[in-house]
Image (cartoon, coloured by chain):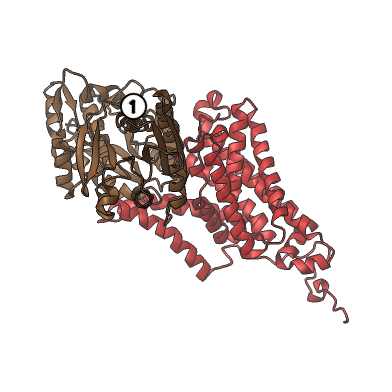
Amino acid sequence: MTSYLLFIGTITAIYALLSLGLVVSWGQAGMVNLGLVGFFGLGAYCSALLTYIGAPIGFGWLAGAALAAAIGVAFCLLTRTLRGDYLAIVTLGFGEGLRLVELNERWLTGGSDGISGIRPPLKEALSDLYPWFYFTLAWAVVALAAWALSRILASPFGRALRAVRDDEKVAAVAGKNVLRLKCQAFGIGAALFGFAGALYAHFTSYISPDNFVIQLTIYIFLAVTAGGYSRLVGAIFGSLAVMTILESSRFAAEFIPGLSAVQIASLREFTIAVALIMIMQLRPQGVFGLRNERAGANASDGAPHATAVPATPN
Amino acid sequence: MAQGTQSIKIGIVIPLTGATSQFGATMSAAAKIAASDINAAGGVAGRPVEVVIEDDQSNPEAAVRATRKLIDVDKVVSIGGSYASAVTSAIAPLCYESKTALFTSSGADSITKTPHNGYIFRTSPTVTLQGTRVGRYALELGAKKMFFLGPQTPFAQAYIDIISKLFKEAGGAGQGLIYEDKRASYRTEVDQALRTNPDVIVLGGYVPDTSVVLKDLYRAGFGGKKVGFSFGVNQVLADGIPQEVSEGTASLVPSASEESPAYRTLIGKLGRPALDSYSCQVYDHVVLTALALAYAAASSPSGTAVRDSVRAISQGGKGEKVSDVAQGLKMIADKKPINYDGPSGPLEFASNGDVEGVFFRYEQVQQGKMALLKVA
């Protein structure tokens, strides 16, 4: 049982990392990224291939994150005129496109056979302690990412991002470089997706294009929505909640009599869909709602006139 | 009978939801029937077996979580059923690292090339074997120029490569085209194929797209041979399109030994007129585990005991052919050698875990009915 919980815990950390990335690009900068699983795959393939030709594992992970970030920024530049639903649908297509590239470039990715035998870090040396090690490592990465992001998002940069999210025109009028801010946020998000992918690849030792399908995107959106889409703590909470639903339904199903295996499996999928609908109906802001964040220096008095933009005469 | 009550758990990881779930319902039913057959015969050394079915959601990521639960929480001795090749490749390391036997019906050649130490048994012919058989049959028909038409599936390119190579070796030529499935017309693809003047067309698709391709071939007046795979060219296809369109199309059906008493008994218990080969294989995965454990007679059942004893009960000239699990268990108890042949086939395994001695049924659509040409 312990090894199972450690395994699920490690996967949860990877989900949490993905959710953090989504909070940055969607929750803070307002760019829906339905192609996150594509960047997840990019990081996974990049690290798997680099370590296969002999690169150190740590380098592979960083390279995976860097490649995903670079592609993310390039993608953001390419789609700079798109917003909202239009951007969402293009990201969805982009993620699927990356999967098709993984499927068809057999010389590089092995096609549908995938890549197996991806090297795990220190597995031989640690033997029995290895699951504990990876679990701790994954959560340490999550903690580090959450800490760094909380610093970044509390800075003027973070406020500018939120201004872009709330109204691009206002942010531009206030002198902010909107495109640059969007690219940075999208890039940070993509880097986290890529790093999560690399962590995943070396954890399970096998990846294939089938790993990187829309299903995972849905889980991450559910996690972020449940937790509160603009909050880092919400992303971590949401990931824990989603994994708890996914895995506990496995055990709960055994107590429902008179259902066939197919019905039980369908019921589990159904639970996820119902959970998403319920959240959107009952608490659309998630467990941790949107917070009114004021600028540092004069935040203490909280009087409306302190933050209100003075009316400009026409 | 101290150990009498505690059941032996056998894990089943099958697609119950998602893109590959078309056989999920019969697969799970077959697994449960296998368990009840074994338990009705008194179980394994007095202990009942229990199948624990988990959904792979047609996704390797979900399959890995399901497998981890089966191995760590349920402590299963073996895992059966795994169907999609990506799922099997993903869960294989978990199985052989934890010394759990893995029975699979996946086709990808790469699966048994992993360092699995004998823990993997594949009951389905590999992609290479199926492609080779189809290619050889097309050559037997006297064809010189082959053209492969198939949808984007994991194996389409492999089929093209394998069959084209066979044709080139025989002094002919072969090429192929991979199309998008779910289209209403394949006129362009068919025209492109016919421009190369093929005398045989290999149909690599499933029933819906193969029906459309056959219609377009008929309209284009193609007069050469047509050969397909069992998942595309079968009675369902023949029932769905006019006789003159399907006439003469050949099909190769792997393994499921439809004349065998084991197969007849299984479809009787399921109450179905016929059953796909994959569900038959799931049945055999459970039975092979039980027979192997009964043979090993180990005090504590384990994946290693399964691995070491499967070949002793499934193959070899000495054993008496047995197709019924109850009879098999009884003979093992009497210390008689057996050779189990299940509903999915004779179940002989090479040293790398691949199934051997698979036979194919060569069938052809004749006036709207599948007619048997030969079994080889």
Residue A43 position within the rendered picture, expressed as x and y whole percent measured from the top left = 61, 41
**Residue B28, x across and y down, in percent:** 28, 46
Dot 1: within a 10 Å radius of its alpha carbon, few (fewer than 14), some, or many (20 or more) residues?
Answer: many
The local secondary structure at tag 1 comes to loop
The hue of chain A in the figure is red
Chain letter for the part of the structure drawn in brown:
B
Q: Is A222 located above or below residue B269 in the figure?
A: below
**A161 vs B283: above or below:** below
The chain identifier of the residue carrying mark 1 reads B
**As displayed, is residue B329 above or below residue B366?**
above
What residue sits 32% from the left and 30% below the top? B142
Residue B255 visible? The answer is yes
Q: Position of residue A29 (x, y in %)?
A: 70, 59
Residue A161's spot in the image, x, y percent? 74, 60
Identify the residue shown where x is 49% and y is 28%: A128
Quarter occupied by the N terminus of chain A: top left
Q: In this view, does A39 lie to the left or right of B180?
A: right
| View extreme (bottom): residue | A314
In the drawing, does residue A159 fall left or right of residue A60?
Answer: right
Q: How many labels does the image show?
A: 1
Q: Mark 1 points at which residue?
A: B354
Whether residue B297 is visible, yes or no, is no
Name which residue type carries label 1: Asp
Judge left or right: residue A56 versus residue B123. Answer: right
